[in-house]
Image (spheres, rainbow, N blue to C red):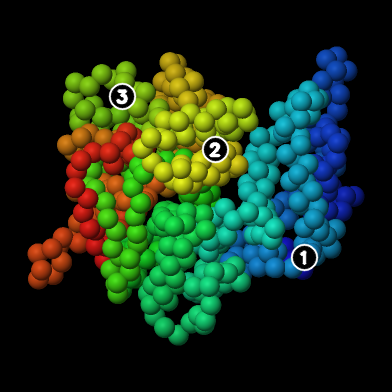
Amino acid sequence: MAAAAPETPQLATSSPEFTFDLGGFLSYLAGDHFHDMPGYYANADTGQYEFRESDEFLAMWEGFELLACSPWWTRAWTAQEIILPPRATFLHCDATPCDYQAIEDADQGWWRLVTSTRACCKDAVQRFPRDKMRTFQTFLRKVYKLDARRSVSGRKLDGRDNFFVVVRSFSDRQCKMNQDKVFSLWSQARDECYKGYELDYKSPIEAVFTEVFTRMLKEASTSFVTKPWPDFRVLYGSGFGPTASLSGKPSWVQNFSHFDSSASMDAIMDRMTCSRLYRAAGWETGIMEVSGRELHLHGQKVDKIRFVTNAVENASDKENLKMVFTEWYGMLGTHLGSRDMTKVHVEVARLTCADVYHASLPPWQRLMKAILFAMRNALFVSWRKINKELDFQKMGDSEQWRRALPLDYPWGSWWQDFIRTGDLEIVDGGYRDAVEAAMTGRAMFITGSLRLMGLCQPQAREGDEVWIVDGARMPFVLRPIEAQGSGMVQYCMVGDCFVHGCMDGEYARSQQQRERITIV
């Protein structure tokens, strides 16, 4: 049983005659029509449904906010209260309780509503207050993460069960002790490599994180999803690189105490899903080897970073996005010289969405895409690799992501207005979702010699290097450092990146010699 925290911020009570019901709002979503809920009425003149925030609706909504806005959803240890038991109920003082099953029913009902062809429901959804719709959709994203863990049994192994994915998906939760960002989810560490490890609160936090992450690398190296090749997604996201507060941690070890906002965490999870749609290393396979404090990889250096913008903390914040776009275009004018700016606009349109789009292809188009892909590559690689690649594409399709098509990008005045204002409401939903996933928590960069454009972790700086790592579907930004006394170059991990023009094996097909990379 899970209790919605009683210290939820005080809400204004609309009317004393209504009793708070935590699941009242959700019960209407599980019904037949969205406009059946309080607040909707039929316009006598037009016959269409209108909406006003009646006292009955406000009381129902405030009951829902007691559930949706509770601090319970921000705490690390509470996740297992939903994940582990077969049944859970939310309580809050004298409000009517809400069973978790009612939340799942509402989630399924909402999906039926948004995919419904009934004009009345589509019209009603459009008239619902936008701020409240955002609150509800944010709540559903929290529920989706928990459902992904509750529905483990009986599903295909598709990478969601890897422990590094589980920990990453709850990185926006808080706890008093940094170890608990991992230990609170230890019941989900099911691979053999985690057995025998005793939760350690006595050793230095750097040693704990290094030991846990080394086991994650071992799990990723034998992942069912990418077998017999490593799953490099373990190295994607934030929390890598030098950390002042954890100076004893190797740069390739994730800093689990790093807090991601919910927006950043959602973006990272979407990028991990979309990474299956890229092939930066082409058909090259790779390995991850840990030797003491060193991580060894192989790959090709692409170029050095010349300029990095400020970070986009949240792409939904139009002022933040507008500021970065202004900085970006000013930098392009300086560093691109005489390049055709019309072509540059097209490249930037592809860059800002990382060349993906949030929508699924119809089944017949997915089939045709798979056939054409197999035919183009049948003479060059084994069918084993082709089948594995098609499996990756199916995983992206299953979560409603695909590579962007020319008609998906905003053009003309739409694009100019978007760049000028930073307002994502100007562009369509699939492109908007892709921009939020691609840019939130990232900065834009351009390289020196090749003038490649990309998106990287905000701690990247001038002089860092872009690398294509064998076996990895995303490039990486690495910082060269000279090994003490040896004169050999070692590297500090900065993080994964997106590089326009390098995501489909273009650079990996070059004849440049591959090098051994030592990351410390």
Q: Tell me which label, 1 or 3, sits earlier in the chain.
A: 1
Element under label 2? loop
Residue at screen point 55% across, 27% down: 368
- Along the horizontal axis of the image, is 105 left or right of 471? right
Residue shown at 32%/33% (left/top)?
A: 501
Report how far apart the C-alphas of labels 3 and 2 lie in the structure. 25 Å
> Which amino acid type is shown beneath numbered disc 3?
Val
Which label is found at residue 344? Answer: 3
In this rendering, the label closer to the viewer, 3 or 2? 2
Task: From the top left corner, tell me how far across and down residue 276 is, in percent.
Answer: 47, 44
The three-letter amino acid code for the residue at tag 1 is Pro
**In the depicted structure, whether residue 334 falls above or below residue 457:** above
Q: Residue furthest right?
A: 17
Residue 348 visible in the shown view: yes
User: For the residue carrying disc 2, how many other residues have a C-alpha within 10 Å: few (<14), some (14-19), or many (20+)?
Assistant: many
Pointer 1 residue: 86
The reply to whether callout 1 and callout 3 are in contact (CB within 8 Å) is: no
State the quadrant of the N terminus.
bottom right
Task: Please provide percent x and percent y for residue 7.
Answer: 68, 65
Distance between the alpha carbons at the discs numbered 2 and 1: 31 Å
Question: To which residue does mark 2 refer?
Answer: 401
In what element is the residue under mark 3?
helix
> Marks 1/3: CA distance?
53 Å
Residue drawn at x 22%, y 58% as measured from the top left: 516
Answer yes or no: is residue 443 visible. Answer: no
For the residues labelled 3 and 2, say whether their Cβ atoms are less than 8 Å apart: no
> Residue 459 versus residue 303: which sits nearer the camera?
303
Give SS at disc 1.
loop
Q: Residue 509's image quarter?
A: top left
Q: Residue at x 19, y 47 (%)?
A: 513
